[in-house]
Image (cartoon, grey):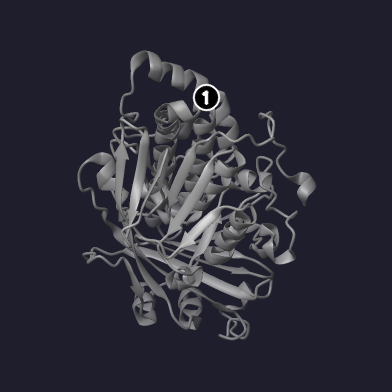
């Protein structure tokens, strides 16, 4: 498959030259690890702190299926992770699901539309499968590059020293580390957020929650039930049911051997600090009690599930600290709805773009690099977030008997054909010059609405 992959655009020489820029990344999720990898590739000296002691302790992630769009896929392929990696099980393409169509139904089972899912698209591949498996590929790649990842190191404080051109972190042990820039990739409940924006901005309930499950098809009866064997008898497949302010999606992978499902529904319960907990299958079944019987049949096969509250917050006024040396990426800056299918992809774009802007700014101009990075990313991220909201509202408003392409999962060129690395090289000079001449100003959005290129690619209702 490698010969069909995206061909890299004209980029600077791949020879790595030490920039002398020291980067500390807090958090070893997709955004943090991607940032560390690209920083290494761009000649920065990088260290990662992750508070958990072992990745396997992230128990709740075992229920999650993750989608990395073509915009992230072209970056991962450039790193050699598509099908050219050293071990068969480390190759992204081999561990991912390969459904060729999305079958969208109304909640009673009427077929609304069958959407083709071409691979590759815009000369790159998407990667869809079990979150821990996808994450492990990036994690192991980072280690193979010699990146220092300190597990079990919890950051409890951030600081910056503008006079000496440094920023730093304090660990739970009391140890302090400084660097030229601190990248807070510490998730939706980021500790760094208050330091960056100057006030508490805790995420709030979105009004929705999701139940997730992941299990073996044969072991749990999918293959022998006439209502569910469609998931195992035709290879990898992807099915959805929408309407009544709910959407339910189920898929199979490994040739129909593994099953996942996720259901998004209304939930106005208060979040007491824990946004995920074990769920009850009977509660999930109650949501689909009057639906196409295939839905209840699939849900009932799961041995367990997770109840995951969807948290959001309004766009932050800035992602960069006052002195420009501590910044937020990924969910710490901009959490996404599941219907966007872009949360991890945009976090990867964040990290790649930052590595480039730091390289171009140089050690003596790190704040210019971080502020140019923010300018490049701010509106694009918001556009992707709004697309996810539009998709959710469209699906949740579906009625029995609806049909047509307007219910397709959006796959616009502006989003998926984007090359974050190439764009950063192309855009940096003009943005940096504007900041130098006019001064830095916090970013602004286009009226909180879609920019024109997004409007043009959003299907009419």
10 Å neighbourhood of mark 1: few (<14), some, or many (≥20)? some
Q: Secondary structure at mark 1?
A: helix
Q: How many marks?
A: 1
In front of the other: 191 or 118: 191
In front of the other: 356 or 91: 356
For the C terminus, which image quadrant? top left
In front of the other: 307 or 256: 307
In x, y percent, where is residue 72? 57, 46
Say if 439 sits above or below 306 in the image. Answer: above
Q: Residue at x 57, y 52 (%)?
A: 147
In x, y percent, where is residue 435? 39, 20
In x, y percent, where is residue 20? 53, 35
160 with respect to 20 (left or right): left
Say if 179 sits above or below 153 in the image. Answer: above
Q: Residue at x 66, y 47 (%)?
A: 79
Q: Residue at x 60, y 74 (%)?
A: 258
Q: Is residue 418 visible?
A: no
Q: Residue at x 34, y 32 (%)?
A: 164
Q: Quarter of the image holding residue 152?
A: bottom left
Q: Residue furthest right?
A: 3
Q: Is residue 4 visible?
A: yes
In x, y percent, where is residue 37? 57, 47
Q: Which residue is mark 1?
A: 427
298 with respect to 199 (left or right): right
Q: Quarter of the image holding residue 86?
A: bottom right
């Amino acid at each position: 498959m490698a010969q069909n992959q995206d061909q890299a655009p004209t980029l600077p020489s791949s020879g790595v030259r030490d920039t002398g820029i020291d980067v500390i990344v807090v958090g070893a999720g997709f955004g943090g690890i991607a940032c560390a990898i690209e920083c290494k590739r761009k000649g920065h000296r990088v260290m990662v702190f992750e508070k958990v002691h072992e990745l396997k302790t992230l128990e709740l992630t075992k229920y999650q299926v993750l989608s990395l769009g073509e915009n992230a896929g072209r970056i991962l392929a450039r790193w050699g992770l598509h099908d050219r990696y050293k071990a068969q099980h480390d190759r992204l393409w081999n561990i991912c699901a390969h459904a060729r169509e999305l079958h969208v139904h109304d909640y009673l089972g009427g077929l609304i539309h069958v959407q083709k899912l071409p691979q590759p698209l815009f000369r790159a591949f998407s990667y869809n499968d079990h979150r821990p498996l996808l994450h492990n590929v990036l994690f192991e790649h980072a280690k193979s590059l010699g990146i220092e990842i300190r597990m079990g190191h919890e950051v409890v404080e951030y600081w910056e020293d503008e006079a000496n051109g440094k920023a730093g972190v304090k660990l739970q042990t009391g140890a302090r580390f400084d660097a030229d820039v601190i990248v807070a990739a510490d998730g939706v409940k980021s500790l760094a957020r208050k330091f960056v924006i100057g006030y508490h901005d805790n995420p709030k309930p979105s009004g929705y929650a999701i139940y997730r499950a992941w299990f073996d098809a044969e072991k749990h009866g999918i293959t022998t039930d006439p209502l569910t064997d469609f998931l195992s008898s035709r290879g990898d497949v992807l099915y959805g049911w929408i309407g009544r302010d709910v959407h339910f999606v189920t898929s199979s992978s490994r040739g129909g051997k593994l099953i996942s499902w996720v259901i998004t529904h209304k939930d106005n319960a208060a979040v007491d600090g824990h946004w995920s907990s074990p769920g009850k299958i009977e509660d999930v079944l109650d949501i689909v009690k009057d639906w196409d019987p295939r839905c209840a049949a699939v849900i009932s096969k799961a041995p367990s599930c997770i109840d995951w509250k969807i948290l959001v917050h309004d766009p932050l006024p800035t992602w960069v600290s006052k002195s420009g040396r501590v910044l937020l990426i990924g969910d710490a800056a901009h959490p996404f709805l599941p219907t966007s299918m872009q949360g991890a992809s945009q976090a990867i774009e964040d990290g790649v773009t930052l590595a480039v802007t730091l390289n171009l700014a140089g050690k003596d101009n790190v704040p210019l690099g971080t502020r140019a990075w923010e300018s490049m990313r701010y509106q694009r991220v918001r556009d992707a977030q709004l697309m996810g909201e539009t998709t959710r509202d469209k699906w949740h408003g579906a009625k029995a008997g609806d049909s047509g392409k307007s219910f397709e999962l959006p796959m616009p060129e502006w989003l998926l054909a984007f090359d974050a690395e190439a764009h950063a090289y192309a855009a940096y000079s003009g943005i940096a010059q504007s900041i130098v001449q006019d001064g830095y100003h916090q970013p602004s959005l286009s009226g909180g609405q879609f920019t024109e290129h997004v409007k043009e690619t959003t299907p009419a209702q």
